[in-house]
Image (spheres, rainbow, N blue to C red):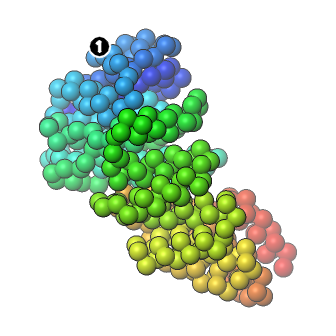
Amino acid sequence: MEISVCMIVKNEEKVLKNCLECVKQFADEIIIVDTGSTDKTKEIADKYTKNVFDFEWNDNFSTARNFSFSKATKDYIMWLDADDIIKNSEIKKINALKSKIPADTYMLRYAISFDKKNNETFSYYRERILRNCNLAKWHEFIHEVVIPFGKIEYLDITIEHHKKDFSNPKRNLIIYQKHIKNGEKLSARSQYYYAKELFYNGYYRKCVVELKKYLKMKNKFEPNVADSYLTLSKCCKLLNNNAKALKLLLTSLIEISPNSEILCEIGDIFVTQKNYKQAIFFYECATLVKADIKSGQFVDKNYYYLFPYLQLTMLYYKIGDFENAKKYHLLSKSCNPNNPSVLFNEKFFNKT
């Protein structure tokens, strides 16, 4: 199989070269669509491909990405952002994939958050390599998506997204507001992401209103439902209503399968209330939940094992159960021995 790599870019001179140095090692064709750069982005792109096209920006990411896909001539299409990086180990896996019997949709891991040592902490699967056919189409004007189709395979290949400066944090919210003002009806996915943009920009009361609308809609995506309850609870806490936050989180346990972050958030509220035994119960439950990354769930690794272990270390110490406190310290140490909290606890236990 041959792969066309398609990208849409704008003012990416700081990062584009790093991405394309990775891409050139496996791509059979590179398609770059520029949506209005005023820096050296196109000049850099020209050094890697002759397929550089202009596209007049219309506040719709899907139309721009579909335009890039329309220029692809190879069997498969892979999409990337300019601030994506692919390590050599992953490039080898992509090149090996090209000689295998093909599926239609390949889901690859997308790592988007890292610790100080550049270890991945937050990731999820995305539809990344797609058969070049009419089903490979982008939907939604922002937070766009291709609906996986045909034979779907999940691969142990990671794309890293190293987001650089974001000059306009309200860009996405402004785009949503423009489409809403023009009378466009939001899909369930767009409704969810619109509410999230409100949250990111500090409009907590409005976020609550819009997330409640989302939860009443059909065709919801369960990981987004889980995150909606989490976001609602965070809004309530920021609005000084911990009781409402707790009620929402407990309601989510009835509505959907529990995840570790929800259980930890419930534990956090009980900690603030100094209800330590209740908090211990929920943190221990959190350690039993496995991250289902293939569900499309956003997975923050800190909530799976490390964070609940640290909290349990502290809580068991507070109630005088030093044996369990030491037990959970050793478990947290096995997860991340260089974590500052783990190192602090290690010094403490060595003295006692």
What residue is rendered at 39% in x and 29% in y?
59
- Percent of width and height locating residue 107: 30, 50
Instruction: Answer few, some or many: residues within 10 Å of disc 1's Cα (few below 14, many 20 plus, some between 14 and 19).
Output: few
What residue is rendered at 42% in x and 59% in y?
213
Q: Quadrant of residue 164?
A: top right
- Percent of width and height locating residue 172: 48, 37
| Drawn side of residue 349 relative to residue 28, left or right | right
What residue is rendered at 41% in x and 25% in y?
9
Q: Amino acid at mark 1?
A: Lys
What residue is rendered at 47% in x and 32% in y?
83
Residue 178 shows in this picture:
yes
- Residue at the right extreme, as displayed: 351
**Closest to the observer: 223 or 30?**
223
Tell me if residue 339 comes above or below residue 290 in the rendering. above
**Closest to the observer: 15 or 271?**
271
On-image quarter of the C terminus? bottom right
Tell me if residue 108 comes above or below residue 300 in the rendering. above
Q: Quadrant of residue 335?
A: bottom right
- Percent of width and height locating residue 88: 41, 38
| Drawn side of residue 202 relative to residue 217, left or right | right
What is the total number of numbered labels drawn onto the structure image? 1
On-image quarter of the N terminus? top left
Mark 1 element type: loop
**Residue, disc 1:** 50
Tell me if residue 310 comes above or below residue 9 in the rendering. below
Q: Quadrant of residue 274?
A: bottom right
Tell me if residue 255 comes above or below residue 100 in the rendering. below
- Percent of width and height locating residue 260: 51, 70
**Closest to the observer: 94 or 126?**
126
| Drawn side of residue 71 relative to residue 293, left or right | left
Residue 126 shows in this picture:
no
